[in-house]
Image: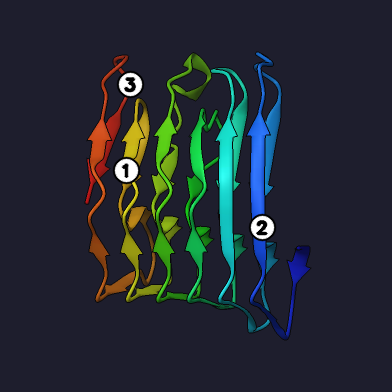
C-alpha cells in the first residue's frame, strides 16, 4: 500500500502476497511488507489484513512483514496476517506476522500464518528472528494472538516475539501455535512461546 507512513491513518486495507522463487543466490535479498514499510510520527495502521503465500529456495535472504516492517512511533491495531512463509531469513533479515521491528505499540492483532525459517550457511554468525506478532520487540504488544506455527532451523522463533530489547512490554497476549526449533547445524537455534 505504501512505503513510508509518517502521519494520519491507513485502515481497512487487504493485500494478497504470492511469491514463489526457484532462484538460488547468496547475494539476493527480498523484503516484503504487506501494508507499510516504515511508520513514524504517530501514524496509525488499523484493521488491515495480509494473506497469500511466500516460498523461496534456501539461499535467498527474505524479510517478510505481514503488516509493517519498522514501527518507530505510532500504532498498529486490529490487523491480521494469514500469509504462510517458507523461506530463509539470510544474514541480515527478520520476519514477522504483524511487525518485524516494534518500537511503539502493536495491539489486538492476530497472526494465523505459518512460518518456516530454513537453514542456510550464510546465516551462521547472525541471530535471525521470526515472530508470530513481532520479530524484535522494543515497544508494547497488547492483546495480540498468535495461532500460526513457527519453525526455525537457525536463529530465534517465538509466538508473540522472538527477541526483545529496551522497554519491551507484553500484556494480555496468547499463543496457540506450535513453536519448534530444528537443530540442523552447530549454530544457535532458540524458541519460546
Residues at marks 3 and 1 touching, judged by CB atoms closer than 8 Å: no
At label 3, counting other C-alpha atoms closer than 10 Å, the crowd grade (few under 14, some 14-19, many 20 or more) is some
Structural distance between the alpha carbons of marks 2 and 1: 21 Å
Question: Label 2 belongs to which residue?
Answer: 15
Please give the label number shown on residue 149. Answer: 1
Q: Is residue 33 left or right of residue 136?
A: right
Residue 136 is drawn in which quadrant? Answer: bottom left
Give SS at disc 2: strand
User: Image check: 50 left or right of 117?
Assistant: right
* Callout count: 3
Q: Residues within 10 Å of mark 2 (few under 14, many from 20)?
A: some
Residue 80, image x, y percentages: 48, 64
Looking at the rendered image, the quarter that the N terminus falls into is: bottom right
Q: Which residue is mark 3?
A: 187
Q: Position of residue 176 (x, y in %)?
A: 22, 55
Q: Residues within 10 Å of mark 1 (few under 14, many from 20)?
A: many
Q: Residue at x 44, y 21 (%)?
A: 124
Tag 3's secondary structure? loop
Mark 3 → mark 2, Cα distance in angstroms: 35 Å
Amino acid at each position: 500500500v505504501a512505503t513510508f507512513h509518517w502521519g494520519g491513518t491507513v485502515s481497512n486495507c487487504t493485500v494478497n502476497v504470492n511469491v514463489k522463487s526457484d532462484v538460488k543466490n547468496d547475494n539476493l535479498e527480498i523484503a516484503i511488507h504487506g501494508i507499510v514499510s516504515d511508520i513514524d510520527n504517530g501514524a496509525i495502521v488499523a484493521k488491515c489484513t495480509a494473506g497469500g503465500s511466500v516460498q523461496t529456495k534456501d539461499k535467498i535472504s527474505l524479510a517478510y512483514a505481514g503488516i509493517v516492517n519498522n514501527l518507530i512511533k505510532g500504532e498498529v491495531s486490529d490487523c491480521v496476517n494469514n500469509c504462510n512463509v517458507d523461506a530463509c531469513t539470510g544474514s541480515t533479515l527478520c520476519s514477522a506476522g504483524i511487525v518485524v521491528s516494534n518500537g511503539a505499540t502493536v495491539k489486538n492483532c492476530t497472526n494465523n500464518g505459518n512460518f518456516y525459517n530454513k537453514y542456510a550457511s550464510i546465516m551462521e554468525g547472525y541471530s535471525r528472528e521470526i515472530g508470530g506478532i513481532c520479530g524484535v520487540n522494543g515497544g508494547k504488544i497488547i492483546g495480540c494472538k498468535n495461532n500460526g506455527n513457527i519453525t526455525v532451523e537457525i536463529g530465534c522463533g517465538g509466538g508473540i516475539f522472538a527477541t526483545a530489547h529496551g522497554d519491551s512490554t507484553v500484556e494480555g497476549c496468547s499463543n496457540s501455535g506450535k513453536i519448534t526449533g530444528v537443530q540442523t547445524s552447530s549454530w544457535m537455534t532458540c524458541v519460546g512461546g
